[in-house]
Every structure is written in C-alpha cells, then in structure tokens.
Amino acid sequence: MRLTGLRTISARIVLGFAVLIVTFGGVATWTVVNMAVVSQDIEIIRVGYLKLALSARDLSETQNQLRLYLTDDFRGEVRRDRVRGRIVGYQRQRTKILRDLEASAAALETLVGKLTVPGRHPQVAAFIRMELERFRAMVEDNDSAYSALDDSLRLSGLPSEVEDPAAIAIVASEVVEVLAKNETRLHNSAFVFARQTEEFADRTAMVLEAKESKLRRLFLYLGTTAVLIGILITGWATLTLRPLRRLRTAAQRIAQGDYGSRIDENGPSEVADLARDFNSMGHAIEERERDLVRSERLAAVGKMAAMITHEVRNPLSSIGLNTELLEDEMASLPGDGEEARSLCRAIQTEVDRLTDITETYLQFARLPKPKLAVEQVNDIIRDLTDFEREQLAARGVELVTELGDVPAVNVDDGQIRQALLNLIRNAGEAVAETGGGSVTVRSRVVGGGADGLEAVEVEVADDGPGIADELRAKVFDPFFSTKSGGTGLGLALTHQIAREHDGAMRVESEPGHGARFVMTLPALSLTAR
C-alpha cells in the first residue's frame, strides 16, 4: 500500500534525514548511556574496591605484625613499658585502618545507590559491610584480654624498667597465649577479607574490560550501520530527484524546437504536477506554434487572394460573357449546333466554378473584423438547420438539433452563420459518402460560477467515417482538404472566425465513429444579462 504522505519530494527527503538523525541520535544516546555505566564502574573501582583492597591489605599486614609480636617477639621483651607501647601502637594503627575501611564501605554503598544498572554491586557492598562489622566485633571482644594483660603487668610489682624477659613472660604467659590465639583468628579473617576485596576489584575490572570491548564492537557496528543508512538515504534522495533530470532534458528538447516532446507524469507529487504543467506548456507552445504557422499561411492566402482577384477575376468575367455571346450566336446559325452549344455551356460551368473559387479566396482575404452584437445562438442554429434540412435530406442525411438553455453571446451574426454553415455542410458531405446517416447540432453551457465566466459550446457531430489520427491536427490548416475539388479553406475560415470572436475550435474524432467539431464562444457575463 502506497503511503500518500510520501508522494512529495520534500516529505521523502525530510523522512530520510529524520531516519538518519534518529539513527545517529540513537547511536550517540546508546554510547552516552553505556559510557555513563562504564564511568560508574570506574568510579566504583577507584573510590570503592581499590581503596578497600589497599586498606584491607594494610589491615592484614598490621594484624599479622601484631600476631607475630604476641607469638614471637613478646617473649624477648625486657621492659614493661615497651610491651605496652608496641601493643598500643598496633592497636591504634588497626583502629585507623578499620575506620578507613568503614568510610570506604560507606562511600561504596553511596555509589551503589546511584547506579543506573547496579548489577551485583549491592550484594558486594552488603557483604563488605557485614565483614567489617564482624571484624570490629571480634576486635572489641579482644579488648578484655588486653585489659587483663595490662593489669597483670601493672600488678606484678615489676618496675617499668625491668630488663628480665623471663619475668615478663612468666607474669603474662596465660593472657598472651589467649591474645595470640585471638589475633591469629583476626589475622586470618583480615587476610581472607583482603583477598576477597582484591578479587572484587579484579572481577569488576575484568567486567569493565569486557564491557569496554563489547561497547567498542557495538559502537563500531552501530556506526557502520548508521553510515550505511546515510548512504542508502543519500541514494534514495538521488533516485527521488532523478525525475528532475527528465524535466531538464525535456526542457532542452523544447528549447531546440521539439514542441511535441512529452515526459512521464509519474513520480513524487511535485514532479508529477510539474510534469503535467510541463506537458501542458509543451502542448500550449505546440498549439501556439501551429497557430502561428496557420496565421502565416492565412496571411499568404490573403495576399494570394488579392492577386487572384486582381489578375483572374476580370478575365474570367470576360470569358464568361463571351461564352454566353458565342452560345447565342450559335443558336442563330442554321444547323443543329447542339454539340457546340454544349461545349459553350461546359466552358461557362468551369468559369462559374473558378469564379466561386476566387470569391472564396477573396472572402477569406477580406474577412472583416466581426461586428459584435448580442445574439441568441439557438436562434441562429434553428434558422440554419431549417434552411439546410431539406437539402441534406435529399442526400439521405438527417439533420437533428439538441439545443440547451444557453445564454446570449456577443457575436457577428453573419460570420457565425457562415462558420456553422461550413461545419454542417462538411458533416453532411461526410455522412452522404457513407450512404446516409445523421448530423446533430447541439448547444450547451460550459463553465460558469459566481464570477460570471461562462462559455457557450456549439457542437456539430456526425456519424460518418471520422478523421484519421494523423489528419486531425491539420484539418484547420489552409489548403488542407480530404475532398476532391475542395479548396481547403472552409474549416480554416471557420477556425479564424472563432478566434476573431475570442473563442476556439476543436475537433474530436475516432476513425469509424464520426467526428465532432466544437465551437466555443464566450457568453455574456452573468452581471451583464
């Protein structure tokens, strides 16, 4: 089903560029969205997992140092204040690292809450938060053992500067053993936590790399698709504009004088409308050229008619007069003389025929400007048909009238009668050649409206043999006739009379189906009646 909204070139081009813009806009939007997701993953790695992994490693190392101190180095300590200083130092460092871990975990949770596509990050953040809380609880549970160690060292009665490691080890051996076990568990937990955070960071980085690779490939595919769509739309626009080349070529042919050139009227609506207007223009130019040639021929006919009238008319009159006198003289001579008188009558007949021809040429050459007056076309048609009906009936031709209710026209009565008489007689002769038939004279109104622009059409139609296609364009040309002995000026004169009345003549015919000659005359405006 053809979309009527795409019949215009502008609609097709706008649609093409709209598709192109939507395609590139979609690719750009998709890229921006995915780059935003990648950017969020990068920020999670940088602000969350990377910091957590580094801090978790520091926690594991600090916890390991504290564990080693309690299990190994403590036995070699010689001063009580040094024991307290080392333990307190490790505890403070662990507390600071644990605080940093908790801050990083909180930052990770904040970032995860802002993610467009969270994925598995919320579960990881919850797991990290849970592990940190569990670790802090284990640290806090160990505080009582450190208090017991401090009490045992302070209540042992040993001075702070004592340098006997055995004495210190003996005093705190039980408490240190408990602490060593607890810190070993904390170290194991911190070590596992550090490994887990590193794995989270590595896994996220690998996912990010996979996303980046996939994004690059998809962007390449989408970009290539967008370019192909752009090329297709460009080709489509080129094909859409191709009919304009036909118009240019046809215009060049008309400029070279080929006024009969016509172009295909298919294509987008603008091109189809332009092609129709172009063909109408070509037809109008062709008609104008034909009218110009016809006018030139008419002018030549006028000059020739004047010459014929001047050179032939008077000698013909003399020949006719002398022939009549000769016939009279022969009648007074003795003898039969009938053959001689017959020859004289034949001469007189030909002289009369030549005189009629010269009169026709003279009438054509001296066709005056019409003297316009308000007339009723139907009255003119009735008078002519009543005058010609009997004569045509004698030749087996029926003359029929179909008169419509037509307005008055501003015409020269004599010239219109002469034009219609030529049409009726030509139609009668064409019908008579086929053995009989009918000639119909019709009148009707065409056009009309509030502006008063109406026209009256008078049609003379016959059911004779019709006119061949190749001859229709020539019937109004001077000297063109299909009848033997015809001057070829009757229809030319009729056409000239119609033009002098600001009207028009046209012929419609199909071989074997008769012919219709239509004279169009401008009617009086509605306001002038």
Image (tube, helix red, strand yellow):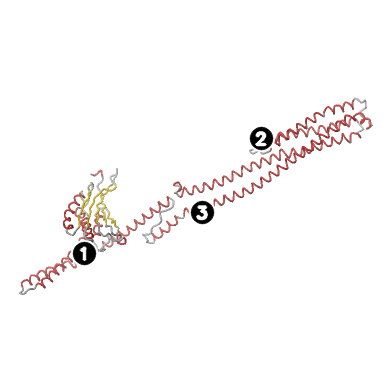
* Residue 113 image label: 2
The numbered dot on residue 306 is 1
Q: Residues within 10 Å of mark 2 (few under 14, many from 20)?
A: few
Q: Are marks 2 and 3 in contact (CB under 8 Å)?
A: no
Q: Give the residue furthest to the bottom.
A: 335
* Amino acid beneath label 2: Gly
| In this picture, residue 163 sits left or right of residue 203 | right
- Nearer to us of marks 1 and 2 is 2
**Which-is-in-front pick, marks 1 and 3?**
3
Mark 1 or 3, nearer chain start: 3
Mark 3 secondary-structure assignment: helix
Q: In this view of the protein, which residue sits in the foreground, 234 or 388?
A: 388
Residue 217 drawn at (x, y percent): 63, 49
Which one is in front, 168 or 142? 142
Element at label 1? helix
Q: Residue at x 83, y 35 (%)?
A: 184
Residue at 39 percent across and 61 percent down: it is 256
Give, as a three-letter code, the residue at label 1: Ala
Three-letter amino acid code at the position of disc 3: Gly
Mark 1 or mark 2: whose residue is earlier in sequence: 2
Q: Is residue 365 left or right of residue 73?
A: left
Q: Position of residue 80 (x, y in %)?
A: 90, 30
Estimate the x, y position of residue 415 in percent, counting from the top left.
Answer: 21, 55
Distance Cα–Cα, label 1 vs label 3: 66 Å
**C-alpha separation, residue under disc 1 versus residue under disc 2:** 109 Å
On residue 11, the disc is: none
